[in-house]
Amino acid sequence: EPEVTQTPSHQVTQMGQEVILRCVPISNHLYFYWYRQILGQKVEFLVSFYNNEISEKSEIFDDQFSVERPDGSNFTLKIRSTKLEDSAMYFCASSAGFGGEQPQHFGDGTRLSIL
Amino acid sequence: SQQGEEDPQALSIQEGENATMNCSYKTSINNLQWYRQNSGRGLVHLILIRSNEREKHSGRLRVTLDTSKKSSSLLITASRAADTASYFCATADTGRRALTFGSGTRLQVQP
């Protein structure tokens, strides 16, 4: 069964450094998402992406965050200047149809640790 | 309570027993979805129930939705040790692409 893959599985970064998290969504999916889960807390929506542009973002997704689909397969999340509070699991997801009406398929996540 | 609150927060049962988890939400939704998360892994979609549906089955899973009470329940019948995981409800609000997740129920199935 096709799956969403994320790399790296664990990223350790110094505060203030830039980090890029990578995702390969399911190949025929059109909608892409990033979520995060701080340890012990809820999964929180960050951003959705469709047709090469952001279609929706949350309050968490401020100017420090950006997303890109640099080629036909990868979908990346960049955090420009990391803060301690950015430490979390970051999940990429994709869906075949409009995200509110179709299941979303998640990767296993990248654990981001900011020192 | 907040959007997508599950109860109980934790549930421990014996293999073979049924497990019931409840979810409440506050907004107008297109659908409600249930996901499972094994420790250290991503979320796996289990079942989606649309706002005009009242009940849905998938294998050992049974989901109900009561839009008048803004609540849903997930029943896992004849539980197995492999069902041990956290279970989350997620709502797709009308007009939005994002999913809003609840805080989850940690299910422990004792062999």
Image (cartoon, coloured by chain):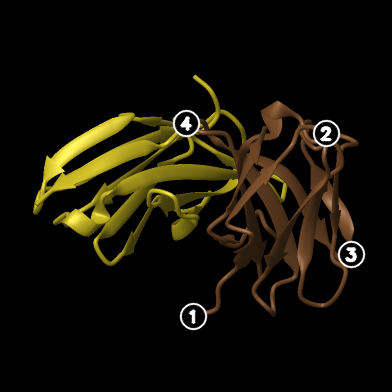
Chain colours: A brown, B yellow
Cα separation between marks 3 and 2: 28 Å
Cα separation between marks 3 and 4: 33 Å
Q: Looking at the image, which residue is at 85% across and 36% down?
A: A81
Which is in the foreground here, disc 4 or disc 1? 4
Q: Looking at the image, which residue is at 76% across and 75% down?
A: A73
Which is in the foreground here, disc 3 or disc 4? 4
Element at label 1:
loop
Cα separation between marks 4 and 2: 24 Å
Q: Which residue is denoted by mark 3 in the rendering?
A: A52
Q: Mark 3 or 1 closer to N-term?
A: 1
Q: Mark 4 or 2 closer to N-term?
A: 2
Q: Amino acid at mark 3?
A: Asn
Locate residue B59: give its quadrant. Answer: bottom left
Element at label 3:
loop
Q: Which residue is denoted by mark 4 in the rendering?
A: A40
Residues under numbered marks 1 and 2 in contact, where contact means CB atoms less than 8 Å apart: no
Which is in the foreground here, disc 1 or disc 2? 2
Q: Is residue B99 visible?
A: no
Q: Is B111 placed above or below A50 here? A: above
- Residue A18 position in % (x across, y down): 83, 44
Q: Which mark is residue B86?
A: none
Q: Mark 3 or 4 closer to N-term?
A: 4
Residues under numbered marks 3 and 4 in contact, where contact means CB atoms less than 8 Å apart: no
Element at label 2:
loop
Q: Looking at the image, which residue is at 77% across and 70% down?
A: A74
Q: Which residue is denoted by mark 2 in the rendering?
A: A16
Q: Mark 3 or 2 closer to N-term?
A: 2
Q: Amino acid at mark 1?
A: Glu
Locate residue A83: give its quadrant. Answer: top right
Which chain letter goes with mark 2?
A: A
Residues under numbered marks 4 and 2 in contact, where contact means CB atoms less than 8 Å apart: no
Q: Which residue is denoted by mark 1 in the rendering?
A: A1
